[in-house]
Amino acid sequence: MFQDTTRVDAVMTRCPVIPVLVVNDAALARPMAEALVAGGLTTLEVTLRTPCALDVIREMSKVEGALVGAGTVLNADDLARSVEAGARFIVSPGLTEGVAQAAVRHDVPLLPGIANAGDIMRGLDLGLTRFKFFPATVNGGLPALKALAAVFGQVRFCPTGGITEETAPEWLAHPAVACVGGSWLTSGAFDAGAIERRATVAATLGS
């Protein structure tokens, strides 16, 4: 079982920051996606943490220029429902063979979460070389990622968890980091103007 690295790289290198979105109201989906895309962030991860998440994926997928994926995918059923809703990539907090196999069956790029060398080795056994380093700051931060990258030279990461607008550039400066996941883009009460401004800044990070 091997994943097409080119397709995963196309997701990871599209923007330096992938907004990690927890949306509680599907009515906000389109205006939120429009604000992020207008600011230059076109790769959007909708987490399956709310009852309306699949509806949010459907609505955001209607926004021109948006590449919408599903996050917090915990099992094969989550993955199947996400793809049916229009998700074009999958992000999971951890790595399981079941989710990896489901991604192959549904022919969808997968970015599974890893926290240590053992996780990466299991991923390599499944033909995976692109991972979400999660939760990034809790698991030792950038020093830990540097240590892992030194051992696994073929691997590229999307660190997520605890990363901020201020700390993102130092993560992005490491050659093993293709992008970062960030929840700060849509924090606080919904404000399309503020989201677009944050996205505009984030779209230039690492450049």
Image (tube, rainbow, N blue to C red):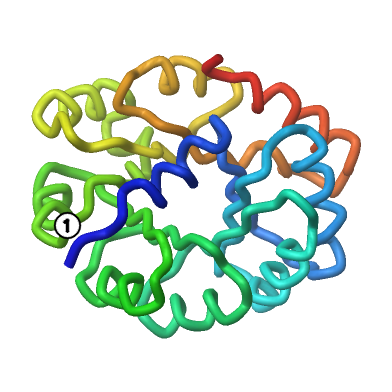
Quadrant in the rendering for residue 82? bottom right
Say which element carries label 1. loop
- Residue drawn at point x = 20 percent, y = 71 percent: 97
In the image, 132: left or right of 32? left
Foreground of the two, 92 or 43 = 43
- Residue drawn at point x = 90 percent, y = 36 percent: 193
* Image location of residue 45, percent across then percent down: 58, 54
Classify 10 Å Cα crowding around label 1: few (below 14), some (14-19), many (20 and above).
Answer: some
* Image location of residue 152, percent across then percent down: 13, 34
Amino acid, disc 1: Gly
Quadrant in the rendering for residue 135? top left
167, above or below 105, in the image: above
In the image, 68: left or right of 194? left
205, above or below 65, in the image: above
Foreground of the two, 89 or 172 = 89
- Residue drawn at point x = 23 percent, y = 68 percent: 96
* Image location of residue 182, percent across then percent down: 56, 39
Foreground of the two, 20 or 126 = 126
Q: Where's the C terminus, which quadrant?
A: top right
54, above or below 89, in the image: below
Count of numbered marks: 1
Q: Which residue is mark 1?
A: 127
Q: Where's the N terminus, which quadrant?
A: bottom left
- Residue drawn at point x = 57 percent, y = 34 percent: 15
In the image, 45: left or right of 66? left
